[in-house]
Image (tube, rainbow, N blue to C red):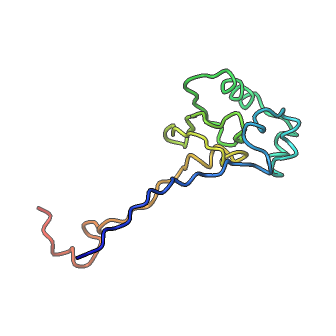
Amino acid sequence: MAAPKKTQKRMPRRREEFTYRGYKIDELKAMGLSELIPLMPARARRKFNRGLNRGEETLLEKIRGGDEKIRTHLREMIVMPEMIGKSIEIYNGKEFLKVEFQPESVFHYLGEFALTRKRVTHGSAGIGATRGSKYVPLK
């Protein structure tokens, strides 16, 4: 006779709260741009020091305004802390892909989340692609 199994309920693993260089997301959202710039990676820091263009400023205004549906072609825009939790549709060259931003995506480019190339799926060879297919009737 088999012994009864011991069943223990395990607590679900809790993820630690995300921090970026020692700051929580709420703290990053509360910071002004002048306080955020020193925390950014070098390329993003250079971009913001040189200033944003009109399209990028318009995109940030839409996000701050709380627009429901935001679509953009600006793949070179950097994900700011105020974008976390929002969903933005990013153009990949063919269509707009809906992206929901997680805390881990802070200070990455929008284009990193809307891939422009499809994954290659290799199928079977087509008619005439191999020597053996010479003898296969077409119909």
Q: Position of residue 62 (x, y in %)?
A: 66, 24
Q: How many marks?
A: 0
**Vertical placement of residue 122 versus 14, above or below:** below
The residue closer to the viewer here, 65 or 96, is: 65
Determine whether, in the image, residue 48 is placed left or right of residue 6: right
Which sits in the foreground, 52 or 93? 52
Could you tell me which quadrant the C terminus lies in? Answer: bottom left
At 56% from the left and 23% from the top, the residue drawn is: 68
Residue shown at 55% from the left, 55% from the top? 13
Residue at screen point 69% across, 43% down: 76
- Specify the quadrant of the image occupied by residue 102: top right
Q: Is residue 102 left or right of residue 55?
A: left
Q: Position of residue 1 (x, y in %)?
A: 22, 76
In this rendering, the answer to whether 57 lies above or below 8 is: above
Residue shown at the point (80%, 50%) measured from the top left? 22
Tell which of 79 and 59 is nearer to you: 79
Q: For the view shown, which residue lies furthest in the bottom direction?
A: 131
How far from the left and from the top, in percent, is residue 7? 39, 62
Q: Position of residue 133 (x, y in %)?
A: 21, 73
The one nearer the camera, 69 or 94, is 69
99 versus 59 height, above or below? below
Quarter-wise, where is residue 45 in the image?
A: top right
